[in-house]
Image: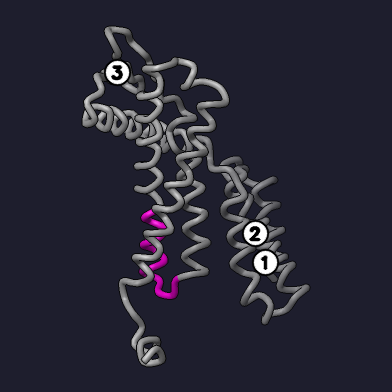
Amino acid sequence: MPITLGVGWYMICVFGPKPLFHHNIMSAGIALSLFGTAWLLFGTVAMRWLWFPIAFTCVFAQTLSEVLLNKVTFQMQDIAAYGAHFLLTVIGTEVDRNGNTLTVWSDGIAHPLNVAEACSGMRMLVAFLALGVFLAYTNLKGWWQRSLLVLCGVPIAILVNMIRIASMGILTQYDQNFVDGEFHELVGVLWMLPALFLYMGTLWVIRNLIVDETEVQHAV
């Protein structure tokens, strides 16, 4: 049944009304077909374990709609630029902000730093949402704990991206080449490590907010 529904939905998207001809809408048919195929081949018992990896792959293996992606990306660019400007100001760095462009001043010399679309933090946000869903499903039991962990991935990704851009603003005072090329990518990778530790710490806190009485009795 799911295979029939999945193939039918995909065909409707392909040959039906034009608004349905969209890869995110069509992916629902692909997901149903994958579920149906796995169910047919491995049975109901196995699907208790297979449904999550299949659903995880169907959700995070596809690209978002360009219209939605652009709206979110532009908003995150503004947030990243504003946050980095605030952090640089707090630590005493002379910096101006004009839209998504930061100008860091050092000895009267201007060092422009453009918060481009690639610096919006969208990729980091998607990565932490995917990581959060995986960790929530495998490490937490309550739905409120799982939801809280996934939601915490949003501010953590945004905060770390602000710090990353602020660190680039500091480095650009010494050499403008620090904000370009491979070094720029290296800084982004390095900031993923403290972000990961921060997220794992958040997982530990959420998991220990409530202690199961049965676990305490067993421990005693």
Q: Is residue 175 left or right of residue 13?
A: left
Q: CA distance from mark 3 to mark 1?
A: 49 Å
Instruction: Look at mark 1 in the image and give the residue it sits on.
Output: 35
**How many numbered discs sit on the rendered protein?**
3
Disc 2 to disc 1: CB gap under 8 Å = yes
Q: Is residue 182 above or below residue 194?
A: above
In-front residue for pair 158/195:
195
Q: Is residue 37 left or right of residue 118?
A: right
Instruction: Look at mark 3 in the image and give the residue it sits on.
Output: 98
Point out which mark residue 31 bears: 2
Q: Is residue 193 above or below residue 181?
A: below
Q: Residue at x 27, y 32 (%)?
A: 87
Q: Nearer the viewer, mark 3 or mark 1?
A: 3
Picture coordinates of residue 73 (x, y %)?
A: 43, 34
SS class of the residue under badge 2? helix
Q: Amino acid at mark 1?
A: Phe
Picture coordinates of residue 211 (x, y %)?
A: 33, 79
State the image quarter where residue 159 is shown: top left
Q: Is residue 92 above or below residue 144?
A: above
In-front residue for pair 23/115:
115
Picture coordinates of residue 77 (x, y %)?
A: 38, 31
Point out the stretch of residues depicted in magenta: 140-152
Residue 98 on the magenta span:
no
State the image quarter where residue 114 is shown: top left
